[in-house]
Image: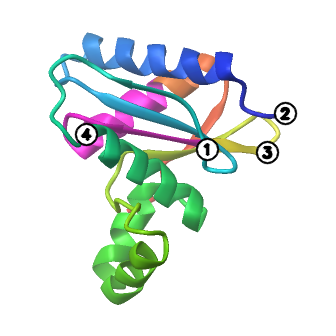
């Protein structure tokens, strides 16, 4: 199974719905396929200038290292030089805070990653996980 445009767009809509229901600040969202290519993206009215880049960096970083960005945040604390080196290696496109979630199908086949930014990192991640659950897919946000 691969991540289809329809599924990626469904995820964007579901994340925005979850964010609105929770009263979160305006969101930017990036849905990447397993290659790291953008499948769908959105930036709500009122997002700040670089929110999309942050959302993309959360998702891209998760794909680059094969772990949700929550785990990358822990590694940034425990292994700051490693995360700095990897950030450089991926052209600066790694944001090691919650809100970058690996996306799998029910058989644990990697489909891609989803990143969101707009509210607190924990709230961004919560909106993503709610949307992934609603689509019947599996999300891996990482661990503290």
Mark 2 vs mark 3: in front: 2
For label 3, the SS is: loop
Q: Image quarter for residue 104?
A: top right
Camera-side residue: 23 or 143?
A: 23
CB contact under 8 Å: marks 4 and 1 = no
N-terminal of the pair, mark 1 or mark 2, is 2
Distance between the alpha carbons at the discs numbered 1 and 3: 17 Å
Q: Which residue is mark 2?
A: 1
* Whole-number angstrom distance, CA of label 2 to CA of label 3: 8 Å
Q: Which residues are magenta?
A: 113-130
| Left or right side of 96 for 35 | right
Residue under label 3 = 109
Marked residue nearer the N-terminal end (4 or 1) = 1
- Residue at the spot 32% in from the left edge and 38% down from the top edge: 52
Q: Nearer the viewer, residue 130 or 62?
A: 62
Q: Is residue 76 above or below residue 5?
A: below
Magenta stretch holds residue 14: no
Q: Name the residue carrying label 4.
A: 51
Label 1 sits on residue: 37
Q: Inspect this view and state whether residue 142 appears.
A: no
């Amino acid at each position: 199974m691969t991540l289809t445009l329809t599924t990626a767009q469904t995820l964007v809509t579901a994340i925005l719905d979850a964010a609105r229901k929770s009263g979160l600040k305006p969101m930017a969202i990036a849905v990447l396929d397993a290659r790291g290519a953008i499948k769908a993206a959105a930036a709500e009215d009122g997002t700040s200038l670089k929110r999309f880049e942050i959302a993309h960096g959360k998702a891209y970083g998760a794909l680059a290292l094969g772990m949700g960005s929550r785990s990358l945040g822990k590694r940034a604390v425990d292994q700051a030089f490693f995360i700095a080196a990897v950030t450089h290696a991926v052209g600066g496109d790694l944001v090691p805070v919650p809100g970058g979630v690996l996306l799998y199908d029910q058989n644990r086949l990697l489909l891609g990653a989803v990143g969101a930014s707009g509210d607190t990192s924990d709230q961004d991640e919560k909106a993503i996980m709610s949307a992934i659950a609603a689509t019947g897919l599996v999300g891996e946000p990482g661990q503290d």
